[in-house]
Image (spheres, rainbow, N blue to C red):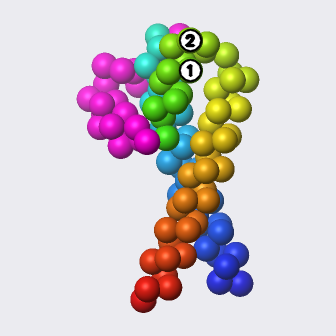
Amino acid sequence: MKNRKLLLLSFGISLIYVLLGTMVVLVSFPKFQTFGFSHEHPLWLPLAIFTLPVNILLFGLAMVDLSFSSIFILQTIVFLICWGVIHLMIKILLNKT
């Protein structure tokens, strides 16, 4: 049961982190600006810096090809890697205590 909670916690954290990063990259383009949130918003730069580790590849891909299928495939791979890393980090932190 403890392992299941750990999996769900790491899943939720990585899902929110990667989705937030994807949103930051997509609103950088005028075509995808939603609800007044764009690259000119004061919150955009801190979010872009905070999510840079998961978005470095997406920034490059978005400059070359802005199709949803390629973005979805890349972010799925990044999400799975991020989920594994966060799961491992939480597991190590819990074992130390």
- What is the count of numbered marks? 2
Above or below: residue 8 compared with residue 78 = below
Residue 64 inside the magenta-drawn segment: no
Work out how far the residue at label 1 is from the one at label 2, CA to CA, in angstroms: 5 Å
Residue 59: percent from left, percent from top:
48, 24
Residue located at (40% from left, 37% from top): 52
Q: Residue at x 56, y 12 (%)?
A: 64
Q: In the image, what residue type sits under mark 1?
A: Leu
Q: Is residue 4 left or right of residue 37?
A: right
Residue to which mark 1 is pinned: 61
User: How crowded is the residue under tag 1: few (<14 C-alpha within 10 Å), some, or many (20+)?
Assistant: some
Classify mark 2: helix, strand or loop: helix
Q: Do the residues bearing badges 1 and 2 touch, measured as CB atoms within 8 Å?
A: yes
Whole-percent x, y for residue 57 in the image? 52, 30
Q: Position of residue 83 (x, y in %)?
A: 60, 56
Name the quarter where the N terminus is drawn. Answer: bottom right
Residue 67: x, y in percent? 67, 16
Residue 44: quadrant of the picture: top left
Q: Which residue is mark 2?
A: 64
Q: Secondary structure at mark 1?
A: helix
Magenta segment range?
A: 31-53
Viewer-side residue, 74 vs 43: 74
